[in-house]
Amino acid sequence: MNRLILFCILILTVSTLSAQDLWTLEESIYRARTGSIDALQSSLSKDFAAINLESAQHQRYPNLNFNTNVNWNFGRSIDPTTNEFNTETFFSNNLSLGSGVALYRGGQIRNNIKQADILMKAAELDHEQLINDLALTVANTYLSALFALENEKIAKNQLALSQQQLAQIQKLVRAGSLPANEELQIEAQIARDQQSIIASSNSYELSILQLKQLLNLDPTDDITIENPSDVEPSTDPFILTFQEVYAAALQHRQDVLADERRLEGSALGVDIAKGALMPSLDAFGNLGTNFSNRGISVLGSEIVELGLDSRLPDGTPFPLLFSQERTLVEDANYPTQLSDNLSYGFGVQLSVPIYNNYQVKHSIQRAELDYQNNKLATQRTKENLKIQVQTALADSRSAKLQYEASQVALNAQQAAFENTEKKYNLGAANTFEFTNAKNQLDAAQLNTLIAKYDYLFKTVVLDFFMGKQITLK
């Protein structure tokens, strides 16, 4: 019983590992969107835009800064705790806490927040466009690998057919019915079939290596792609119109939407630049204190009796007594001085721009030029999109016609080969005729395969412009 359980676990483990190595097109696209280097770098651009938005929003709030400094003074200088000149060397320490807030900046703060929010949305759209482009690139590479697999399969089938024919010819050569030269021609054909297999296998390995790079996988990872049977295009380009595809592309192409957001942001940039022409009003407040090692604290006062020895005009001693008030002090410690020397204040500041060496004027002109540049960029993106849509529609229609024509040619060539093969088996056709018919069939099969995958990819591009999910199902 235990052995049976272990055997079942082993089978499940192997099955799980095998499933992990099998990559579908959908899984490959998801991996590229979330784990490729290009996608990760694009995410950083979104993070930068989010930081810029948060920075713009915090311009509304007051700032708060703490400052401190220490000084050693020599010679005649002013003691900050008494504001009196002192000729002795002393040590001092100043501390201050300041805050300020912008009350009015000509609408610049509000417009900066709006612009940063718009540019963050543009960055998000750029990221979405990049991962969609990655999906299209992955699909192209994936289809290239499938094409190589199908081509290798055809080449292997042709090799098996040539080997069967060689075995039959060898019997006829040994029986003396055919010359030995016939056998050599088939062996040459077998060598060409083997070359086709090697070339197809190499093309598959290169496509898989490119796919690993797109998915940010290690080149040494062993992966296998899913090879769905009978993959056929799901979109008929002849039932679509240019206006229909272009209208859908305008709604789903994030690069167009991102350009429109940047255009909106550059319009706000003009308002931001014009805001510098308006007065600005700021409020501020501060709190400060200081310390000196020469600082003292007043404890109180006392009356001191003083006497002077004096004499009358005749020389008789006459003591002169008087009283004097004396201030009692002691060295002030650090906390006491910080408390006693505390000061604070607040106020507002109005700044009216009058002349700034044309800096504001030039900033407005640059912002207006940036707006015009973004307007042209948006127009160019839309015009390029029209050309891309028209090209995709024309290419997919042409690819469909070529695929259908290649199927007709393949069917005709298959019938011709079967007829030649029957004649060859009956001795009515020689080896050259048989080999030539087989080569033409090989070429027809390859042309059909190429036309099929070309048509398949062209319809994938068409679906991409219409915002459909890229899939082979």
Image (tube, rainbow, N blue to C red):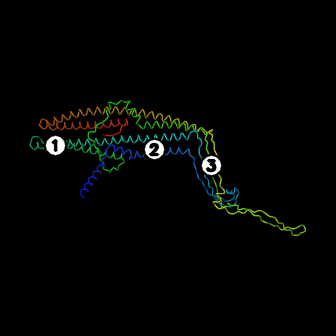
Residue 237: x %, y % from top left: 32, 32
Instruction: For marks 1 and 2, give the one nearer the viewer.
Output: 2
Q: Name the secondary structure under disc 3.
A: strand
Query: Few, some or many C-alpha atoms within 10 Å of disc 1 (few <14, some 14-19, many ≥20)?
Result: few
Name the residue at 49% across, 46% down: 51
Q: Quadrant of the N terminus?
A: bottom left
Name the residue at 26% across, 32% down: 404
Q: CA distance from mark 1 to mark 2?
A: 62 Å
Q: Name the secondary structure under disc 1.
A: helix
Which numbered marker is on residue 46?
Answer: 2
Residue 164: x %, y % from top left: 16, 43
Q: Amino acid at mark 3?
A: Gly
Query: Few, some or many C-alpha atoms within 10 Å of disc 2 (few <14, some 14-19, many ≥20)?
Result: many
Q: Amino acid at mark 1?
A: Gln
Residue 8: x %, y % from top left: 25, 54
Q: Name the secondary structure under disc 2.
A: helix
Q: Amino acid at mark 2?
A: Lys
Q: CA distance from mark 2 to mark 3?
A: 37 Å
Could you tell me if residue 69 is visible in this image?
A: yes
Could you tell me if residue 362 is visible in this image?
A: no
Residue corresponding to mark 1? 164
Which numbered marker is on residue 242?
Answer: none
Residue corresponding to mark 3? 285
